[in-house]
Amino acid sequence: MSPSRLSLAPRYRGARHALLALAALPLANADALAQAAEDGVTLPELSVVGEPGRSGFGVASPQGSAPSVIEQPVGQVVTQVGRSGTIDNRPATDIGSVLVNSPGVTVRQGNGARDVVISIRGNNARSTGVTKNMVVLEDGFILTQPDGASRFDLVDPRAYSRIDVFRGPQSALFGNYATGGALAFRTRTGREINGYEIGTEAGSFGYLSNYFTVGGASGPVEISLFASDARGNGYQGHSSYDTQTINLLASYTPTPDNRFTLKVINNQVNADLPARSSLDQFGINPYQRGCAAAATAAPGCTLTNLRINGAFGATVPVTADEGAFGRKDRRTIVAARWEHDIDAQTTWRTQLGFDERNFNQPFYTSSSRGSYPSWNFLTDLTRRGDLFGLPAVGYVALAYNTIDNHITTFNRAPYGGPTLGALIGDQEAVQSNLGGRARTEVALSDQWTGVLGIAAENTTITGRNLAYGYSAAGRTTTVATTDRSFLNVAPELALVYRPNAAWAFRGRAATGYTTPAASNLFITPAGLPGSNTQLQTQENLGFDLGADWTPTENLRLSLTGFYEFFRNELVSQSPGAGLLSYTFNAPASEHRGIEFAADWAFSPGWRAVAAYTFDDQIYTTYTEQLSAGAFTERFDRAGNAIPGVPAHQLLARIGYDQPTGPLAGLGAYVEAVVQDGFFLDNANQLKAPGYTVVNANVHYAADLPGGYARRISLYAEVRNVFDETYVSSAQNLANSLSATSGLQNGAGVLAATTGSVFAGAPRNVVAGMRLSF
């Protein structure tokens, strides 16, 4: 029996008891196990074994905070994306332009100008709405809601000093939804800012952003506050937007062994949405220009059919302008943490957060309105000591989170602004996750470090969906209910070997799981509200093998090979234009590939960086059933590439910064972002084309002696220098049968199916200035 067919639960039954027993033992001195790293390293400083001085991933803790295993995990493949070259000296208008600096990361345009969809190792590359299959944290607080959804509207890159990208299954550390990895954002602390900054950016397509940062420390109090306002007309028709973000991090240290942290984030987004086109329309009119009115629409404009009476019967085609497609969303997060040193070897942390996602999204054929309030609780204990005479660190945690979903869905009616039609869905659901985690890191010798970890978590989903249908005879109601419970266990084993200071070799076997969200259970394969309650947990067993070589302080190279076996992989696709995407389980699939990163300061002032990913994903067991008219056929998709995942991705950058003399602080670089084409359907009939986008940047920074301002930073960037027309987002498309012949429709039918493609930005220029006081 192949590994892809094995169940994760029985596979590790014997290992679980050993892991739990070992994690409960007293453990090691963290100072001997924390990894050195520098803020500002653009490509990976990989967390393979602990060394003194490393700050925790994604955690901006008060001074005196003790290191935690979850902040400094040994044996993980972690890329640190810092400010230099990615945030500090360029217009980082969205988080996607920053995260492409990490191997393994795929970026897709989301529903709104700053909204992007992120995937790690292709595990979310099929999504075009929210980010799933990973856990997102900021300063140690969870930003992923308990239904697994993460959005990046609220993330303004200029607030951060570093982002850590965890690649591979991470449920032993982060629990549910960490099937593909995790992202950890680290806000700039008050001590890092030590004053205040103001900045402004302006560029093509009416882009304007103003922001400020203030921070400092006084005695036991440390505060940093970031706020921004960004707006623009957008490069596509009907894509104007404005968004405001506030991000606060504050800490209070009343005694050396008690530390309190407060985190507040609020984001408001108001965005017009263009219509997603077909691949054929993308070739004719990629930016949906001249599409104000259906009666005068230019060739290639995407039209959406809305019911004239908003309920049933005749339809009328409208453009995105006429339908007033858009989003008006708000996200608010308030969280606090208490950190207490029980003794010199033991630290206890407890944190609680409230997170509400409120949305109003009248786009395409339906309009969704809802509020998703959630709570997130975590308490953990870190013990540093000896295990059989060996330095070790032990970590145990208890985590609970819950979300209360209520969403109403309406038909859209044409004209008159975002006019609502008849109510077609009313969904209420509660989802809760309760689990425990344990981890042990042991310094087996001066050269070897071992890691054992395990997590167990129970997820419950209870809910009801009312689906309404309309005809001349009146309204019908269909009720779908669910009361599901999922128990998942995720072991992890890692081993790191450092023969000398230049080399590190690492091996890792880990598991991850993602339960369906309530929203997945109530959208049918027809793309309508209804019952889809048979979905199962997605499980991933992944193996990593890699090496890191740092022969000098000016050169870092990293190579990782991965092989991951999925069971019941959750795959989403669109059944057609204007319909909701639905989710199904692919019984077995495999993801395998390599990740390479290089950072080379090869001459004074010169620096080259590269991040390359090869990602080959295939179905190994999946039979798809298609029906049309009187015909029903089954198709074996085994061996087919999983749609939405590019096989090759590359970021390559070369730059020069004048180190000395009167021009010190002046620099420039050129980068290329390359992405391979990817299939859009399970039958592998249609492919979105690949692309190469070249960006060029010039920047200057200098201290200002004798003036009120301390420092000035200036930068300008030409993006997409060669004006490449490319696909930045494409919804996967469902294959179909011909109702007359019973044969599977070919690539021509898929290429003409609307509701899939967003084009990437054409050539544009953005310039900015920042003053530090």
Image (cartoon, rainbow, N blue to C red):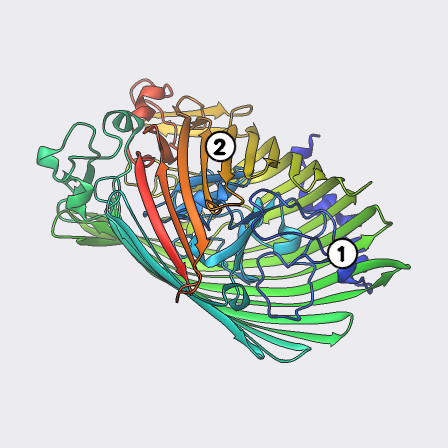
Q: CA distance from mark 2 to mark 1?
A: 36 Å
Q: Amino acid at mark 1?
A: Leu
Q: Quadrant of residue 442?
A: bottom right
For mark 2, does the 10 Å Cα neighbourhood hold few (<14), some (14 to 19), or many (20 or more) residues? many
Residue 395 vs residue 415, the one in the foreground: 395
The residue to which callout 1 is attached is 33
Residue 269 visible in image? no
Residue 713 visible in image? yes
Q: Residue at x 42, y 47 (%)?
A: 700
Determine the secondary structure under disc 1: loop
Q: Residue at x 25, y 34 (%)?
A: 287
Residue 468 vs residue 244, the one in the foreground: 244
Q: Amino acid at mark 2?
A: Val
Determine the secondary structure under disc 2: loop
The residue to which callout 2 is attached is 645
- In this view, the residue farthest toward the right is 389
* Image quarter hosting the C terminus: bottom left
Q: Quadrant of residue 712?
A: bottom left
Query: Percent position (x, y) of residue 460?
Result: 54, 59
Query: Percent position (x, y) of residue 112?
Result: 32, 48
Give the mark, 2 or 1, whose residue is nearer the N terminus. Answer: 1
Q: Nearer the viewer, mark 2 or mark 1?
A: 1
Q: Is residue 605 above or below residue 454?
A: above
Residue 333 vs residue 31, the one in the foreground: 31
